[in-house]
Amino acid sequence: MAPLIALLVGTTLARLAGLAGVSALDGWHPALRVGLALMFVLTGVAHFVGQRRAGLIAMVPPGLPRPDLLVTLTGVLELVGAVGLLVPATARLAAAGLGLLMLAMFPANISAARRKLTLGGSPVPPLGRRAALQIAFVATAVAISFGP
């Protein structure tokens, strides 16, 4: 739920800043970029911190090699993508890359839901709710990739 809150709050605050006169944030498209970047900073940092990291490593489907390395790599990609979203020249490409990354990582969410894992002490969301969130996040990335 925290990633959704980060996306919504970040987008809203960025849009309000645009309405208050910050020209770089004047419009929904740049506000969405800020909201999605904030979401990926939040999720990217989780790949490196304590119980969250351990939970993400456990989420990697069995059979994939080096779950710890995969979690580190995806965390780095999320953080680099977040920075890319904030640079107008790279925002579309970063959003497309992050959208593809979310699709590639979705099997880990399916695996975690089926195995009833916990993430940072909380159970992972049920698959239906997680899929709905994933659709919203990927749709945001698509909107940024193909928006104005």
Image (cartoon, rainbow, N blue to C red):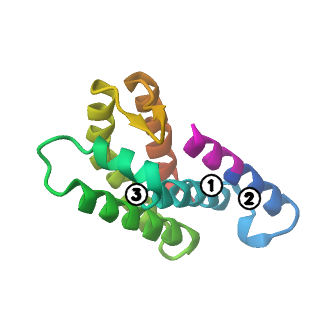
Q: Is residue 112 left or right of residue 38?
A: left
Magenta-tinted stretch: 1-9
10 Å crowding of disc 3: few (<14), some (14-19), many (20+): many
Asked which quadrant contains residue 17, the reply is bottom right
Task: Name the one closer to the observer, 19 or 67.
Answer: 67
Residue at left offset 51%, top offset 65%: 82
Task: Give the Cα separation between the discs numbered 2 and 1.
Answer: 7 Å
Task: Name the one closer to the observer, 101 or 147.
Answer: 101
Residue indicated by mark 3: 98
Q: Is residue 3 above or below residue 133?
A: below
Which disc is residue 35 wearing?
1
Could you tell me the amino acid type at mark 2?
Ala
Whether 4 is among the magenta residues is yes
Residues at marks 2 and 1 touching, judged by CB atoms closer than 8 Å: yes
Q: Is residue 96 above or below residue 112?
A: below
Q: Position of residue 145 (x, y in %)?
A: 46, 58
Which disc is residue 14 wearing?
2
Point out the tag, 3 or 2, that comes first from the N-terminus: 2
Task: Name the one closer to the observer, 22 or 115.
Answer: 115
Residues at marks 1 and 3 touching, judged by CB atoms closer than 8 Å: no
10 Å crowding of disc 1: few (<14), some (14-19), many (20+): many
Could you tell me the amino acid type at mark 1?
Gly
Q: In the structure shown, which secondary structural element does the residue marked by tag 3 occupy?
A: helix
Q: Is residue 115 left or right of residue 79?
A: left
Q: Main secondary structure of the magenta part?
A: helix
Q: Position of residue 143 (x, y in %)?
A: 51, 50
- Looking at the image, the residue that sits furthest to the right is 20
Q: Is residue 122 left or right of residue 97?
A: right
